[in-house]
Image: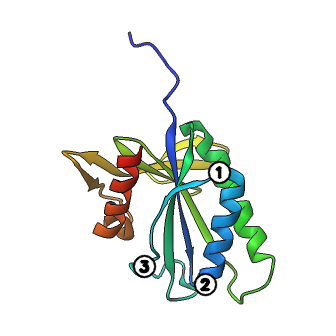
Amino acid sequence: MGTASIHKPVMFVSGFISRYPDAIEWGLDKSIRKWGAISIKSEPFSFDETNYYEATMGKSLRITLAAFSDRIQPTDLPEIKHQTNALEHQFAETNTYREARPLNIDPGYLTLAKFVLATTKDAAHRLYLDNGIFGEITLKYVHKVWQDQPWTYPNYRRDDYKAFLMQCRDLF
């Protein structure tokens, strides 16, 4: 019989998606105030592998990934997802942009073995975490590389994303 133990802290990583650089900066600033300093931040990557967000966010989306210095517990992820959703709503309520959702904040965490994203959408490959939030192992780390899952989002299959997550793993 195994003995249950508390999970070691994990690295909080979040994606900030928008067509507006100032929206991403606003999200980063609010996140720093809430979760502390950023250890490492990516350059803006194109986010054009899907048109899923086009109706609510527009075209020509970019994403900046950021890893935070302060570690979290994996069990914090549902509350963080609710907090990032609240920040998105707060920004949308400024009515600065014509899109219904000018900013998307996509939280997750990284361990030495996996990269997990939070979502409100259930699917066969997602585990219910708490309070309406599910977790998805988006990438796994095996044989010194980040490997896709069958369900990995197309953008997270890209080498530039994986290179950034490798830098995060090295920091972790």
**Residue in view at x 35 percent, y 70 percent:** 154
Q: In terms of depth relative to the viewer, which is nearer, 117 or 160?
A: 160
Q: Secondary structure at mark 1?
A: loop
Q: According to the image, label 3 marks what residue?
A: 50
Q: Position of residue 157 (x, y in %)?
A: 31, 65
Mark 1 vs 3, N-terminal side: 1
The alpha-carbon separation of the residues under discs 1 and 2 comes to 23 Å
Q: Which mark is residue 20?
A: 2
**Residue in view at x 39 percent, y 65 percent:** 153
* Callout 2 amino acid: Tyr
Mark 3 and mark 2 residues within 8 Å of each other at the beta carbon? no
Q: Residue furthest left?
A: 143
Q: In terms of depth relative to the viewer, which is nearer, 23 or 40?
A: 40
Q: How is the image coloured?
A: rainbow
Question: For mark 1, does the 10 Å Cα neighbourhood hold few (<14), some (14 to 19), or many (20 or more) residues?
Answer: some
* Callout 3 amino acid: Thr
Q: In the image, which is nearer the foreground, mark 3 or mark 2?
A: 2
Question: For mark 2, does the 10 Å Cα neighbourhood hold few (<14), some (14 to 19), or many (20 or more) residues?
Answer: some
In this image, 165 relative to 72: left or right? left
Q: Which mark is residue 36?
A: 1
User: Up-down: is 106 above or below 77?
Assistant: below
Q: Position of residue 100 (x, y in %)?
A: 70, 81
User: Up-down: is 87 above or below 144?
Assistant: below
Mark 1 vs 2, N-terminal side: 2
* Callout 1 amino acid: Gly
Q: Position of residue 136 (x, y in %)?
A: 45, 50
**Residue in view at x 61 percent, y 84 percent:** 20
Mark 3 vs 2, N-terminal side: 2
Q: Secondary structure at mark 2?
A: loop
